[in-house]
Amino acid sequence: GDSVTQMEGPVTLSEEACLTINCTYTATGYPSLFWYVQYPGEGLQLLLKATKADDKGSNKGFEATYRKETTSFHLEKGSVQVSDSAVYFCALSPARSGTASKLTFGTGTRLQVTL
Amino acid sequence: GAGVSQSPSNKVTEKGKDVELRCDPISGHTALYWYRQRLGQGLEFLIYFQGNSAPDKSGLPSDRFSAERTGESVSTLTIQRTQQEDSAVYLCASSLVWDRDHEQYFGPGTRLTVT
């Protein structure tokens, strides 16, 4: 079945450092890929998405490119802020038409940014 | 507008008791999903509702788990004869249309602890 693997945390960075959180997936066909974020005390919210190969999703300075050849969707940010401290989840939605948009999630990566 | 709400926010129950968890989706959202997040793991899909179609129950872990939805409104997830392994955060999400690319909006979750 479908699966998502992402790097284990926690990841601790100083403010303004570069961030990469690795995510790889296993799925049939051409799934849609997502990054969700959960800030402390808040619900899960969509950060960015990409629906086909070579698409780049971006939001709030974060980017991720859908790489079918490496089945990856790594999350990157050039300069992190303390306010980016959160748990980040990589997820995919199946490619098959006529099915539910149920999401398959990775285990989450906790990011802590310090001054 | 109001987001997805869930109640209770926390529930502690004794092993063997039944529990009911409630989800109020965003008004007008036709699709509703339940997920479970056990400690240190990713979110697992449980069940999905779309309008009057038969729900996709493929993620329910056992026959102790069931869910209902009245029309396009409130949903209740019921766990009978709870076990310690049922301890988790139960998340509900809703979306506008039955479309794999459409954003799912998550509630804050119900933290269930089975003692």
Image (cartoon, coloured by chain):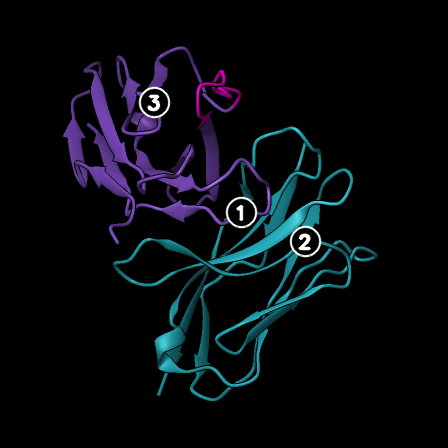
Number of other residues with Cα within 10 Å of mark 2, as a class: few under 14, some 14 to 19, many 20 or more: some
How far apart, in angstroms, are the residues tagged by discs 1 and 2? 11 Å
The boundaries of the magenta stretch are: B48-58
**Magenta: main secondary structure:** loop
Q: Which image quadrant: the C terminus of chain B?
A: top left
Q: Is residue B20 magenta?
A: no
Left or right position of B13 against B68: left
Q: Chain of mark 1?
A: B
Q: Is the C-beta separation of discs 1 and 3 under 8 Å?
A: no
Residue at which label 3 appears: B71
Residue B21 lies, in percent from the top left, at: 24, 28
- Chain B's shade in the image? purple
Number of other residues with Cα within 10 Å of mark 3, as a class: few under 14, some 14 to 19, many 20 or more: few
Residue A13 lies, in percent from the top left, at: 46, 80
Residue type highlighted by circle 2: Thr
Residue B17, located in which quarter of the rendered image?
top left
Residue B4 lies, in percent from the top left, at: 29, 44
Q: Chain of mark 3?
A: B
Residue type highlighted by circle 3: Gly
How far apart, in angstroms, are the residues tagged by discs 2 and 3? 30 Å
Residue A23, located in which quarter of the rendered image?
bottom right
- Residue plotted at (77% across, 63% down): A54
As drawn, which residue projects farthest toward the right? A69
Question: Could you say which chain is coloured cyan in the image?
Answer: A
Looking at marks 1 and 3 on the same chain, the residue that comes earlier in the sequence is marked by 3
Find numbered disc 1 in the image and state the secondary structure of the residue it sits on.
loop
Number of other residues with Cα within 10 Å of mark 1, as a class: few under 14, some 14 to 19, many 20 or more: few
**For the residues carrying marks 2 and 3, which lies nearer the camera in this image?**
3
Closer to the camera in the image, B27 or B33: B27
Q: Which disc is residue A51 wearing?
A: 2
Residue at which label 1 appears: B102
